[in-house]
Amino acid sequence: MKNLTTRTAMTLSALALVFCLCASAHARPAHEQRSDLLMLLNAYEFRVDAKVLRKIGPDVNKLLIEVSGDPGFRPRVRNHALMALSVYPVTQTRRYLESLLHEPSLIGNSTGTLIRRQALRSLGKAFGGEVVVPIANLKDDKNPQIRIAVAHALAETKSERAIPILSAWLPHEKELGVREAVDRALESFHKRGQR
């Protein structure tokens, strides 16, 4: 009986501690969350880590959208924010990423190309087969870098629905770099199918 009481007390203590930690994480002011997020996004060797992002607080998705859309931040920081959005597969993220694909201010400049490329990759990674068509709609973009990103994004979806699109696209693509990207995307599906 004493063991049961000790276990119960320990369990209740652990639950109280978890509750306090969760409450304190969610109660952090937005400016603290923003500060922590910017420190992370400014890291030279940035790596997307969902656990780290979630520990920052509940406003991270909104803050990532805000940072990635702010031209006042360096392109690298904006790109890191877009990379991090791949771990937030919610409607708000999808709408935002899709809006970047056709944003006129991002077309025809190097920063815009960087932003659009990462938006494509994050969209494919976060939403898989749901976004094959919106991604594939850019396979005829004038910019070969965007077309390369489309091929990579279609591979990132890991959706079998991308295979016929890639297969039909390959023989008609004139740019060698894009053809190689499309070929690698198709190859990634074949490798996955062999496992």
Image (tube, helix red, strand yellow):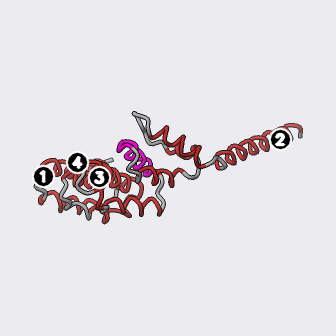
The quadrant where residue 151 appears: bottom left
The quadrant where residue 80 appears: top left
As drawn, the label of residue 175 is 1
Q: Residue at x 78, y 41 (%)?
A: 13
As drawn, the label of residue 112 is 3
Is residue 51 visible in the rendered image? The answer is no
First to last magenta residue range? 74-86
Mark 3 crowd level (few <14, some 14–19, many ≥20, 10 Å Cα): some
Image quadrant in which the N terminus is located: top right
Alpha carbons under labels 1 and 2: distance apart: 68 Å
Query: Picture coordinates of residue 2 (x, y %)?
Result: 89, 37
Which of the two marks, 1 or 2, is nearer to us in this view?
Answer: 1
**Amino acid at dot 2:** Ala
The quadrant where residue 162 appears: bottom left
Label 4 sits on residue: 184
**Which secondary structure lies at badge 4?**
helix
Query: Picture coordinates of residue 192 (x, y %)?
Result: 32, 49
Q: Nearer the viewer, residue 170 or 140?
A: 140
